[in-house]
Each structure stands twice: as C-alpha cells, then as structure tokens.
Image (tube, rainbow, N blue to C red):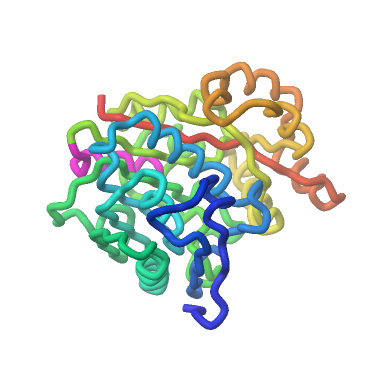
Amino acid sequence: MDTARPLVVDARSYFRLGAPTRIAATLRIGLSEHCLAPSPGDLDADWLASVAAPAFHILARTRPAAQRQSFLSIGTGCGLDALGAVEILGSSMIAVTDVFPDIIAAARANIVANLARGTTIALTAETGDLLGPLVRSPLRFDVVYENLPNTPIAEAGLLAERHTAAGFLGPRTEAMPAFVRQRLLVLHYLALQQARPMLNQGGAVLSTIGARIPLASFHDLAASAGYAARLLTYGWKKQAAPEEYIPGYVAMEREGLGPFHFYRVADVRAAFAGLDAEQAGRDAPGIEADLTGRRVTAGEALALHRSGTEIAHTAVALLSEPA
C-alpha cells in the first residue's frame, strides 16, 4: 500500500456533508496495487461521490437508525464507501470484502485511520469472491452495498494483469436468466442472491449500477432474484477511463451483447439540470424517454471521445428488499 503519498480527500465535499462527526474531515487514503483510485478532484467522474453518496443520504433520511447499524460493502476497494456508511448512515458494525488481499489490507487500514476521535466500530474485512468469505459467519446486515463491475475490459479475464479490480470478471458458471448475462448484470444478480440469507429483518441491498441499458432491466434484475425494488436515484457520471472501458463495450456489442447506451456530457447535463438525484429517480422513465434521441452506441461514443467530446453514461441506485 502506498502510505508514503496517500490520496487526500475532503470528506465534506466528497460526501456532501456539513461538518463530519464520525470520520475525519480530511481523509488520507492509501492505495494498494489493485485498488481503483477514486477521483476526488473530479466528482462528476467519481462513482462513490456522484452515485453512492446521494443514495446513502436518502437512506439516512428514510430508514430508521436501527435499520442502518450494520453495513456490508461487497467489493469495497479502498474503503471509502465504508467510511461514508460510518458517517452518513451512522453504521457501527462494518464489514468489507474484495478479491485481492492487498485491497482488503488497504481498506482496513484506511477505515481505522480515518475514524474521528471517539468513534468506535466493529470491523470485519475479508478477502474473497462476493459474499463468499462471510458465508459461515454469524454476521447479518441491515444494508448490503455493492458497486460491482459490469464494465467489460477490452481483454476480458486479465484482471490480475490490469492492476485493478474494476472490470468484467469473465464467465461465471452459476445458473441465471439469459437477460442477466446479455446486459452484463451477472455480478449484481449473484450479489442479490447471496445477500438474501445475510440480511436482518427489514434489511435491503443497495446496488449502484451504470445504466447503459434500459431502466426496466433493473427491476427485472431484482425480481429475478426474489426482491421488490425501487430506484432511489437516477443520474449521470462521466465515463471514467474511456480508452480503457469503451472499447470493451464495442467488443461486447459485436458479440451480440447489449446494446449499451452512452451520451455526450453536455446532453445529460442538460437533461438532469435542476433535478436532484432523488427526484430524478422518481422521474426516471420520463427522463430516459427524453434521452432516447441523444443516445450513442459504444462505437460512436469511442469516436466522439477520440475527437475530444466528453462522454457520459447514466447510473442508478437500486434499493432491493426481499419480496
């Protein structure tokens, strides 16, 4: 882990806070070899800041405190999501998993080091696939959070050589509906399945997912895994690392997957102007319909990017509760 030059994150702007009380106001985040670095200098391109944090605030406002105490992040990365849960949700029991030991070591260190003085939590940090490391654990959770990859990399399956855990992790052998594979929702579906027996009474799964596919797909996803779901938020973010990720979508479309939807940043900025994420979640079908004529394919998005146009995609926060 790079502790000599940690990434400095202003918790107030990053998590949209006043004065934080349970975590440090200035976070110092060490990144290991396989950690995907957050983008605190460009919040429109940062997943946690632009998509997850608004959903956390909605949960903090709408769910009783007793249903926010235990929080699990699947695929935590550097642990910033857990720190957000400590501060925004008030969670006191935190668990995190990820696929590389160095990621989990970094996450554990970052969470512990960035708690405010006097804040105490119970922390479990385990390495492994999805919820696998916790299957035999007695732990149960009020909120299971996942921002798992549904973004293909151009050379699928070379995860360890790509240095981060952000990429579509290749084929899975588990049985699932055909549309789940077609629309790259495999890991989200498996997380929903695995989370069911690990939820407390009244618990829920919060999935934040790139919405490069029709919005109806997300309700179908939850229903196929035995949940009732609603969109907490609908919004947009800049496409991170477009040269790394968009070619993967181009390749997947050529193989018959998708289609996948991209937009010019200017178009989505105009479409969502004046809407907060929660209101946009309520108005999502209408916004999606209004954006129909502004969609571009993966191939078109790549060409636009290479000509200097900023590319974006929409994103959702989906709250799924066992049906």
**Could you tell me which residue is drawn at 61 percent across and 58 percent down?**
40
Q: Position of residue 156 (x, y in %)?
A: 53, 58
Residue that sits furthest to the right in the current view: 307
Residue at 50% in and 53% down: 168
Q: Is residue 43 above or below residue 218?
A: below
Q: Is residue 187 visible?
A: no
Q: Position of residue 58 (x, y in %)?
A: 44, 33
Decide if residue 89 is on the left or right side of residue 80.
left
Give the left or right position of residue 292, taking residue 52 as reference.
Answer: right
Relative height, residue 221 to residue 133 (above, below): above
Q: Quadrant of residue 134?
A: bottom left
Residue at 53% in and 72% down = 161
Q: Nearer the viewer, residue 178 or 110?
A: 110
Q: Is residue 35 above or below residue 237?
A: below
Magenta span has 93? Answer: no
Question: Where does the magenta region start and end?
Answer: 187-200
Q: Is residue 177 left or right of residue 269?
A: left
Locate residue 239, reporting x and y percent.
67, 48
Q: Looking at the image, can residue 28 be seen?
A: yes
* Number of numbered callouts drawn: 0
The quadrant the C terminus occupies is: top left
Which quadrant would residue 193 be assigned to in this image? Answer: top left
Q: As drawn, is 110 to the left or to the right of 129?
A: right
Type of secondary structure dominating the magenta stretch: helix
User: Where does the image place residue 46, in percent across and percent down from the top left?
Assistant: 60, 51
Point 26% across, 59% down: residue:
121
